[in-house]
Image (spheres, rainbow, N blue to C red):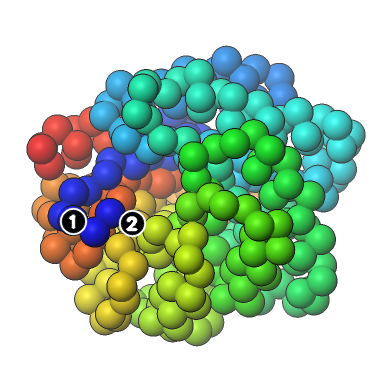
Amino acid sequence: MTDSTVLRLDGGLSTALEANGHSVGGSMWTGELLLSNPGAVTEAHRQFVDAGADIIITGSYQLSFEGGRRADWSDEDTERALRNSTTAARLAADEGTLVAASIGPYGAFLNDGSEFHGNYGVSDSVIREFHDRRLDVLLATEPDLLAMETMPDLAEVQVILELIGSKNADIPFWVAFTVSMPGIIAGGGTFADACALVSENSGAIAVGINCSPVSVITPTLSGVETDLPFVVYPNAGQAWDSDSMSWMGQPAALTTDHVAEWAALGARIVGGCCGHGPATMKETFEKSG
């Protein structure tokens, strides 16, 4: 990933599932289907593969043992859904398609939009316990890489990186942060600090931004220097309303001009997040060449 090749990442899995007629409005989001109907998740992944994605991200983002208990799942249910998340992606993948296991933040479990502000008010030990067992299960499924994504806090990322190191997990990963304004990650701290933190780890293949509006991407990337490639997958620019559990406002387009601009700044993995379904990504990929 040191040359100018840009790998094509998928788009919003929940967006694809909703377009296919599935409900993902519960507290476990796509995790509900990974327990009740994993074939539907495979179908959605496959739509992104058919659209041209080189990498697909599993539906494990919202899955956690704490969240499962809150939803009256047994821990065995959560383990099965986590394993199903990688299996569903593998079944959709072509030869050469990479599967990235999603590691969502503690804020996802709170189900109140905390991914977009961080500062959970809990200790590092609570964060560590939250991620530890889930990480063990996902590593056992042997994904090609890990996608730590929608991360608002430097402190939480540090805990996860330490956990990966303690497990001697020889697996590549990227870390993507939510950015609230150009150059500033959602929980405070600068994107430059985020890049420095991630770049200290030998397994890191990229650092970047996801589930953030298109408007913050270019000024944020252009304001830092790092030896790591960037990974970028913005949402459609809408605001998450935790009361209605829906995105509010008019969506913004993801264009080939955006992709070219980010590639020129060092992005080597580019895709979409919430609001960008297979049709959007197919059009963007095709026009980007």
Q: Residue at x 68, y 38 (%)?
A: 140
x 43%, y 45%: residue: 274
| Corner quadrant of residue 50 | top left
Whole-percent x, y for residue 267 in the image: 25, 59
Amino acid carrying label 2: it is Val
Closer to the camera in the image, 267 or 116: 267
Q: Nearer the viewer, residue 239 or 92?
A: 92
Kind of residue indicated by mark 1: Asp
In percent of width and height, residue 14 lies at 50, 35
Q: Quadrant of residue 31?
A: top right
In percent of width and height, residue 253 lies at 24, 47
Disc 1 packing (10 Å; few <14; some 14–19; many ≥20):
few
The vertical placement of 52 against 177, above or below, is above
Q: Can residue 81 be seen by looking at this rendering?
A: yes
Q: Counting residues from the N terminus, which is met first, the one under dot 1 or under dot 2?
A: 1
Residue drawn where x is 37% and y is 21% of the image: 94
**Residue 8 percent coordinates (x, y):** 28, 41
Q: Quadrant of residue 11?
A: top left
Q: Is residue 31 left or right of residue 208?
A: right
For residue 232, the mark is 2
Q: Which residue is mark 1?
A: 3
Does residue 48 appear left or right of residue 175 in this picture?
A: left
Q: 270 and 274: which one is in front?
A: 270
Name the quadrant of the C terminus: top left
